[in-house]
Amino acid sequence: MRLSDWRARAPFKESMAPKVIDVIEPVLVALGADADPGCWIVWGDDPVARYLLFVPTQAGLLQIGVRVNVPQEGPRASGKLIRWSRVSVGELAVEMADRHRLLSFQLEGQVLKGTDEDADAIAAFALELIANIDGHPFTPPRTVAGGGKGGAAGTRPSAASSPKGSAGTKGTKAAKVAKAARAPLSLPAARDGAS
C-alpha cells in the first residue's frame, strides 16, 4: 500500500494532512525512497499526535517517526535507515476462526495486527520484509480462492517495484535490476534420497 493510499485509512484526517505529508516526503527522498513509496503505518496509541512509518528500500528499512503537531513548530518527521542485516522481526503468525483470519507480526518492537483483508496486507508486507532480509526477490502471494476479488495481498505494490526501479526507463541498469528482483525465486529440485 502506498503512502497516498493511507490517507483514506487515517484514523484522524489531520494525521495525514497536506502539511504533514510535506514534512514526510523530503525525509523519504533523503533516505533513498520515492516520495510516495509502498509502506506500512503503525498508528500506535495516539495517532492524532504521532505515528511510525516503515518503508522497505533497496538498502534497508526506513523507520520514520511522525509528530503531527509540535507546539509552536507544526508537523515534524525524523527518519533512519536500518540495514537489512539489522532489522528486527518476530514471528509471522495467523489464526483462522469462523472464516476470519487474525494475523500478528512484530517489527522493530512494534506489533502489526489485523483481520481478514488487513491481515492479508500485513502478511504481504511481512513476507516482503523477510525476503529482503534473506536477500531473495519478493513475489507477492496469491489471494485465497473465494477470498474476494484482488485482495490486498495480491494488489499491494512491492518495494522492489517502486524504490529499486524508480528510474522508469526500460534500458537502464536500475530497471534491469528491478525486473530481476521481481522474478520468482527458482529452487533446485529435491532428489529422491540419491546422493
Image (tube, helix red, strand yellow):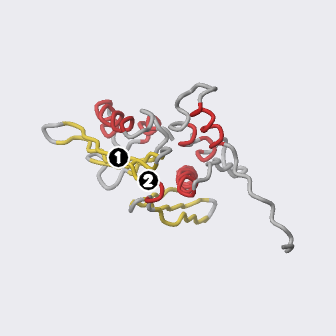
Q: Is residue 116 visible?
A: no
* Foreground pick, 35 / 11: 35
Secondary structure at badge 2 equals strand
Q: Is residue 133 above or below residue 26?
A: below
Mark 2 residue type: Arg
Spot occupied by residue 170 in the image (x, y as percentages of width and height): 63, 26
Q: Residue at horizontal 49%, vertical 61%?
A: 105
Q: Residue at horizontal 28%, vertical 48%?
A: 50
Q: Residue pushed farthest left?
A: 72
Q: Which of labels 2 and 1 is toward the front?
A: 2
Which of disc 1 and disc 2 is earlier in sequence?
Answer: 1
Mark 1 residue type: Ile
Spot occupied by residue 71 in the image (x, y as percentages of width and height): 14, 41
Left or right of residue 74: residue 14: right
Spot occupied by residue 3 in the image (x, y as percentages of width and height): 44, 38
- The numbered disc on residue 83 is 2
Circle 1 is placed at which residue position? 64
Q: The C terminus is located in which quarter?
A: bottom right
Secondary structure at badge 1 equals strand
Q: Residue at horizontal 68%, vertical 43%?
A: 183
